[in-house]
Image: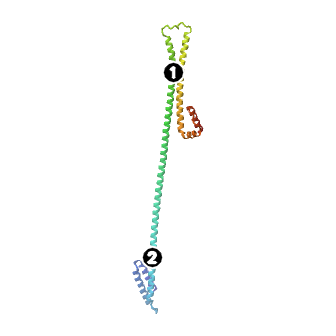
Amino acid sequence: AAAAAAAAAEKATAAADSGVAPLTASAGETGQSAKGGVEASGGGSAAPPDEEVAKVARLLLEAERGEAERAETERVARERAEAEAREEQARELQLAEEAEALREEEVVETLLDVYLARLEALTDRVEQLATNIETTQGVLELTLDNERNRIARLELLLSMAGLAVGASACVSSFFGMNLVSGLESTARGFVTTVFSSLCLSATVFLVAWRRFRSVSREQGSRLNDVKVLKSVLGHLDTIGLLLRSQPALPRNPKEMRERLEGGLRLSG
């Protein structure tokens, strides 16, 4: 009977995948085999009741169901773990791709910043070179203007000297005429004429020189007035404060200019 029950249990285990019906049939066969074995064994022992056989079959069926459910649970858990592992790998791959893209973007931004800094440096150098060229051009123009002024001054001095010498030559040309003037027999006529000619030339030159100096001083005074006016316009607020804190300005332009210059020097 025990051997028959073990065989029925093995049959029920083999038929676990085919559903409940085969297990029920195996359980019936197990019961019948158990009855046959007990009857065959003989010997005055009574046959086991059908309820015990059914109970054993139910227990076997429940055990098989538990094994099947446990196997299914393990399979589902394993598939879920594999799916989570795949999702984790996909998430890590996506994070790695995002990090790589961010790194590339940072590299591109760094390169753009470097190029922008180089461009700004080149722009500054170009502006500096342009400023230097303009400054050099202004200095050259000032130098040329100074040279032209020196040449014009020399030409003016030569013109004044020529005018003075021309005055002496005019006197000599007057006395060089072949006309009788009555001064031929004078003892000191020659010396007097030469001295008078030299005095005339010196007088003409001195008058022309004084006029030239007067014009130069007037031009210098006008330039100074222009500079003072520019300085006053540049420091108009400071001049306004100084004028409010001081008495009225004099009417004389020279004294007014000196007062303003002194106020600007005191104010720094």
The residue positioned 48% from the left and 45% from the top of the image is 120
Q: Quadrant of the C terminus?
A: top right
Position in image of residue 251 (x %, y %): 56, 33
Amino acid type at image mark 2:
Glu
Amino acid type at image mark 1:
Met
Q: Quadrant of the N terminus?
A: bottom left
Task: State the CA–CA distance, disc 1 to disc 2.
Answer: 133 Å
The residue positioned 47% from the left and 56% from the top of the image is 102
The residue positioned 46% from the left and 67% from the top of the image is 84
Q: Is 13 or 120 nearer to us in this picture? A: 120
The residue positioned 45% from the left and 69% from the top of the image is 80
Q: Is 197 or 228 nearer to us in this picture? A: 228
Position in image of residue 148 (x %, y %): 49, 28
Mark 2: give few (<14), some (14-19) or many (20+) Cα within 10 Å.
few
Q: Is residue 207 left or right of residue 50?
A: right
Label 2 belongs to which residue?
69
Question: Nearer the observer, disc 1 or disc 2?
Answer: 1
Instruction: Inspect this view and state whether residue 24 appears.
Output: yes
Q: Looking at the rendered structure, which numbered label has been put on residue 160? A: 1
Q: Is 22 or 196 nearer to us in this picture? A: 196
Mark 1: give few (<14), some (14-19) or many (20+) Cα within 10 Å.
many
Position in image of residue 88 (x %, y %): 47, 64
Q: Are marks 1 and 2 in contact (CB under 8 Å)?
A: no
Position in image of residue 110 (x %, y %): 49, 51
| In the depicted structure, whether residue 39 falls above or below residue 162 | below
| In the depicted structure, whether residue 99 falls above or below residue 114 | below
Q: Secondary structure at mark 1?
A: helix
| In the depicted structure, whether residue 98 falls above or below residue 233 | below
Q: Looking at the rendered structure, which numbered label has been put on residue 20? A: none
| In the depicted structure, whether residue 1 falls above or below residue 215 | below
